[in-house]
Structures are given as structure tokens and as C-alpha cells.
Image (tube, grey):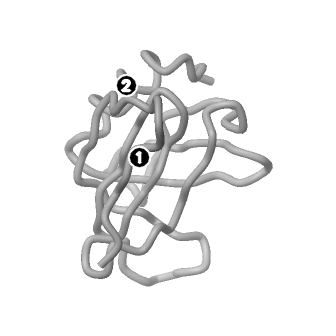
Amino acid sequence: MAKFQLAEGEKLIGSATMAFVEKAAVGGRPTQGKLYVTNQRVCFHMSMLGTVLMEEKLSDIGGYAEGRQGLFIKALLIHAKGNTFKFTGMGRKKVMGWLDQAGVQKM
């Protein structure tokens, strides 16, 4: 299992257990894992295998927004290089604060 590692000079701002909702998984289940926000990047590691499913430099992230997953579940949307990554979970508001700290703009 690959473990999340900080690069030299990188500092962890925060990490939260989240579910990654993939576009391709229509009707599928969200993937559980940890979302990490550092002073250099945002990264999502899948829980079971530690596989990196999303890793974007802060400079490549155009912004973040709140959205919905279904009718009732609020989601965090991270926009990077023409892609939108959707996450749900109880740590959503904390992650938005960490993104603010990292200089990512709310859209």
C-alpha cells in the first residue's frame, strides 16, 4: 500500500476522510479515501490500496465550489486543468478552509 509522502519543503495543511465521486462510475459507489491539502498540491489516496486517484499542483487548480451529489448530499468540486473532481463527506467544510489557506479561490 502506497503511503502519502510529503516532498521536500512541503507542509501538510490538513487531511480528511472523504469519498471521491468519479464521473465514469455512473450509478457506482464513491471511492473512500483521504484527501490531503498541502502548501503545494491536493491529493486523494484510495483507502483500500493507497492508490493515488487525484493529484494536482495548487498552480493547476482553477478553484473550488460547493455542489451536490444527488438531491441531498453536498459535495466539494475541485476544478483543475479542465477536469472537475467531486468529493463528499463530513470533512467538506474543513477541506474548503484548507483550500482557502493554500490560496485556492472559491468559485
Residue 46 location (% of width, % of height):
35, 70
Identify which residue, 18 or 45, lies in the foreground: 45
**What residue sits right under mark 1 in the picture?**
75
Residue at x 33% of width, y 33% of height: 12
**What residue sits right under mark 2 in the picture?**
98
Q: Closer to the observer: label 1 or label 2?
A: 2
- The quadrant where residue 2 appears: bottom left
Residue 105 location (% of width, % of height):
60, 19
Precedes in sequence: disc 1 or disc 2: 1
Would you call the spot at circle 1 few (<14 residues within 10 Å), some (14-19), or many (20 or more)?
many
Residue at x 55% of width, y 17% of height: 103
- The quadrant where residue 59 appears: top right
Residue 38 location (% of width, % of height):
43, 33
Under tag 1, what secondary structure? Answer: strand
Residue 93 location (% of width, % of height):
30, 30
- The disc labelled 2 sits on which kind of residue? Trp
Position of residue 14 relative to residue 88, above or below, is above
Q: Is residue 48 left or right of residue 69?
A: left
Position of residue 62 relative to residue 4, above or below, is above
- Mark 1 and mark 2 residues within 8 Å of each other at the beta carbon: no
- The quadrant where residue 32 appears: bottom left
Position of residue 40 relative to residue 106, above or below, is below
Quadrant assignment for the C terminus: top right
Q: For the view shown, which residue lies furthest in the front direction? A: 8
Q: How many numbered tags mark residues here? A: 2
Under tag 2, what secondary structure? Answer: helix
